[in-house]
Image (cartoon, rainbow, N blue to C red):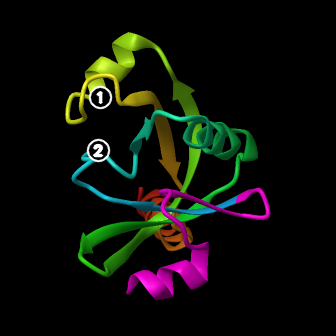
Amino acid sequence: MTTKELAIIIGGGDSYIRTRKNIVTGLAVKPEINPDAPDIILVGKGPRMRANAEKFLQQGQYVPVYMKQAKNAWSYVGEYKAVSYSREPEIIEKYGEVRRPGSVDGVLFCHQRMKKMGVICFILVGWMWKRES
C-alpha cells in the first residue's frame, strides 16, 4: 500500500498515531525507530505526541496498524489497542535504547485483537478433542 492510500484509510500527516476529528484512526509505524512494534511503541517528545498516545490509551479501541516496508510501501499487520502507557525512566531506558537519549517521552504497550477465525478453529479443535476422549 502506498503512503497516499494509507492516508485515505487512516488519515495523513507526519504522526505515527493518526487521528481524524480528535479520534485515533490507526497507526503508521516505522520499524527502524520502533523495532518492537506494533506491540511496543516508543512515543517521542512533544505535547502532541504525548496527547495522541494518551488519547489512544483512553479511547480503548482497536485500530488498524500498518508497518513501513520501504519508501512509499506499507503493510497491514492487524488491529491493536493501547493497554498501558509508561513514562517511567526505567521502562523508557529498557525499550528506548534504539533512540537518541532524551528523545522518548514514554512507551505505549499495545495488544492485538484476536482473529475470529483463530478462535473458531480453537473452539472446533477443542470440541473435536473432547468428543474423541
Question: Who's the residue at 50% across and 57% down the image?
Answer: 15
Most distant residue in the right direction: 21
* Nearer the observer, 103 or 60: 103
Image quadrant where residue 69 sits = bottom left
Using residue 65 as the reference point, say whether residue 19 is left or right of it: right
Where is residue 82 shown, x and y percent of the image? 58, 43
Q: Is residue 87 above or below residue 117?
A: above
* Nearer the observer, 54 or 75: 54
Where is residue 52 shown, x and y percent of the image? 63, 45
SS at badge 1: helix
Pick whichever of labels 2 and 1 is earlier in the sequence: 2
Q: Where the N terminus falls, by quadrant?
A: bottom left
* Whether residue 94 can be seen here: yes
In magenta, the rendered stretch is 1-23
Question: Callout 1: 10 Å neighbours few (<14), some, many (20+)?
Answer: some
Labels 2 & 1 near each other (Cβ < 8 A): yes
* Nearer the observer, 103 or 130: 103
Question: Who's the residue at 39% across and 12% down the image?
Answer: 89
Q: Amino acid at mark 2?
A: Asp
The reply to whether the magenta stretch includes residue 9 is yes
Question: Who's the residue at 34% across and 76% down the image?
Answer: 74
Where is residue 54 shown, x and y percent of the image? 65, 36
Question: Who's the residue at 25% across and 35% down the image?
Answer: 99
- The residue where tag 1 is placed is 95
Image quadrant where residue 25 sits = bottom right
Q: Amino acid at mark 1?
A: Tyr
Using residue 97 as the reference point, say whether residue 122 is left or right of it: right
- The residue where tag 2 is placed is 36
The reply to whether the magenta stretch includes residue 64 is no
* Whether residue 1 can be seen here: no
SS at badge 2: loop
- Tell me how far mark 2 sits from mark 1, CA to CA: 8 Å
